[in-house]
Amino acid sequence: MLAGELALAGVDVAIVERRHNQELVGSRAGGLHARTIEVLDQRGIVDRFLSQGQVTPALRFHMVPLDIGDFPTRHNYVLGLWQNHIERILADWVGELAVPIYRGRDVTGFMQDDTGVGVDLSDGQRLAAQYLVGCDGGRSAIRKAANIEFAGWDPTMSWMIAEVEMSEEPASGFRNNVFGIHALGKMGKGGTVRVVLTEQHLQTGGEPTLHDLSEALVAVYGTDYGVHSPTWISRFTDMARQAATYRDRRVLLAGDAAHVHAPVGGQGLNIGVQDAVNLGWKLAQVVKRTSPESLLDTYHAERHPVGARVLRNTMAQVALRRVDDRTTALGDTVTELLGMDEPRRQIAAEMSGLGVHYDLGEGHPLLGRRMPDLDLFTAKGPQRVFTLLHHARPVLLNLNGSGNVDITPWADRVQQIEATYSGPWELPVLGAVAAPAAVLIRPDGYVAWVGDTTDLGLAEALIAWFGPPAAVPQPQ
C-alpha cells in the first residue's frame, strides 16, 4: 500500500520482499474494516476487493456483534476477504504502477546519514535510497537494526491456528470450556477447515506440529476429526508491543513493525494499511522537497495514538476471554453495555477506523476527521468526494459559490474544486454537523482546514501541510 501511494505521487520506490512470489501459505488475516475500504475507494481500487469478498454488517468486540449499518458511510460493513487475496490485489495494483519488487531477498542491514540510506540485501546488492520504511512485521529487522524500543506487555495466553483437512465432519462454530474459546469452520467450498484453539498453557517457542494440533483437538472436542494435510499451522499470543517512535531520522516503521497485539477484532492489517496511507503523501512531499522533513514527525504524532488505542482494546478483549467466574460476570456486563446504542457506536467507530480524529487544533468538528464521501455537483457534473482523491492529491473544496478562495501559489499541488452540496453533513458518533463553506482535504482523506465565509487560516494550513507558496509570475 505504501509503495502504491509513493508511486502515485511520482516517487521512485521499490519493495524488497523475502518471498519469491506472491503466493502466501495459508489465508492469514481476514477482513477489511470500513475505513480501510474507504481508503481503497479513495484510490479507485475498491471494486477489486468488493468483487472477491463477502459483506458482513457487523464487526465484533468480545464476540459481541456491533452492527454499523447506520453509520454515515457508503461502506458501513466489514468485508470478509483473506489476507492472501488482499495482498495479491494490492500487488497487481503496484504492478500497474510499475513498482519494482526485489523478490527472494532479505534486508541484512543498513547505514543512514544526513544524505540517505544504504540498504544491504542478502544477495550482496546494496540499494541507495533517501528513506527506508520497515513494513517487515512484528519481528521487524529494520526496527531492531534501528534500535527502536518495542515497549509493551509480554504474552499471557497463546492460541494454535491452522488450516487443515479432516476425515470426519467437524463441529463447526465456537466452543467454550475451562481453557477458553475455540473455533472450527469450513473455508469456502473446499474441504479445508480453519482451526483456532486456546492453548491450556502459554506457549511461545517454535511452531506447533500436526501432532500438537491433534492432541489439542482431542483435549477440547474429544476427537481430532481425523485431521491431516495441513496447509498451515502456527501460533499467536496476546503479546502487545508498540514502537517507541515510528521514525528514526531516515528510517520509518509501518504496520506490524510498529505495533503488535492479539488479532481479536481483526484490526492489525487495517491500521497497517492506514499507517501507509498517512505516511505515503507526507514522505513523497519530503522526498520531492515540497515540504520540510519536519512533516514526517506528524506521522508518528498522528498514528502512534491510533496504535496505542488498538493495543488497549485488544488487551481488554483478551482479558474478557479468561474463564473464571469474575471475568464471566464482567463479560456479561460488557455485553449488556454494548447492547446500548451509545457504547455500540463508540466502540464500533474506534474498531472500524471511522472514528479516528487527529488533533489539528480547535475548530469545526470536521477538522482532523475523515472527509465524508459526499455527492457533489461540479462544473463537470455530479462527482463524489472520493473520486477527487483517486490520484492522491490534496483538494480544496469550495462550497459557498462565491469563488473568493484563491490558492494560486499552491495550484501546482492542490486541486481547487468549485462545488455545491445540499445534503446533510454527518459524522460517525458525532452525528449531524454544521455545513462548512470550504474544506481542505489531505491526500489521505482527512480534513486539514475548514472555512466559513472567509479564508482565515487557509494559507497557514496550506503551508503546514503542502509546503510554502510557489512564486507566482507577475503580469508584465
Image (cartoon, rainbow, N blue to C red):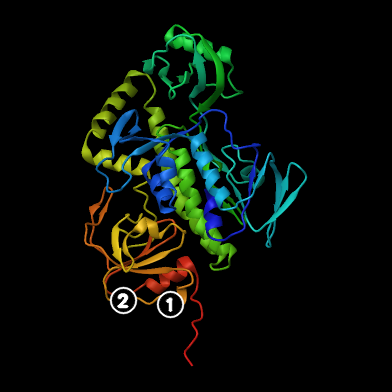
In this picture, is 120 found above or below 473?
above
Measure the C-alpha gap from mark 2 to mark 1.
13 Å
Amino acid, disc 2: Gly
- Residue at 28% x, 40% y is 68
Residue 304 falls left or right of residue 64: right
Name the kind of residue labelled 1 in the image: Thr
Horizontal relation, residue 426 to residue 185: left or right: left
Q: Which mark is residue 103?
A: none
Q: Which residue is mark 2?
A: 403
Residue 352 in percent (x, y) is at 36, 42
Residue found 34% across the figure and 33% down from its top: 61
Local packing at callout 1 (Cα closer than 10 Å; few below 14, some 14-19, many 20+) is some
Dot 2 or dot 1, earlier in sequence: 2
Q: Are marks 2 and 1 in contact (CB under 8 Å)?
A: no
Q: Position of residue 399 (x, y in %)?
A: 28, 68
Indicate the quadrant where residue 182 lies: top left
Decide: is 207 above or below 150: above
Residue 243 visible? The answer is no
- Indicate the quadrant where residue 318 lies: top left
Q: Which residue is mark 1?
A: 408
x 31%, y 35%: residue: 58
> Whole-percent x and y of residue 7?
56, 56
Mark 2 lies on a secondary structure that is loop
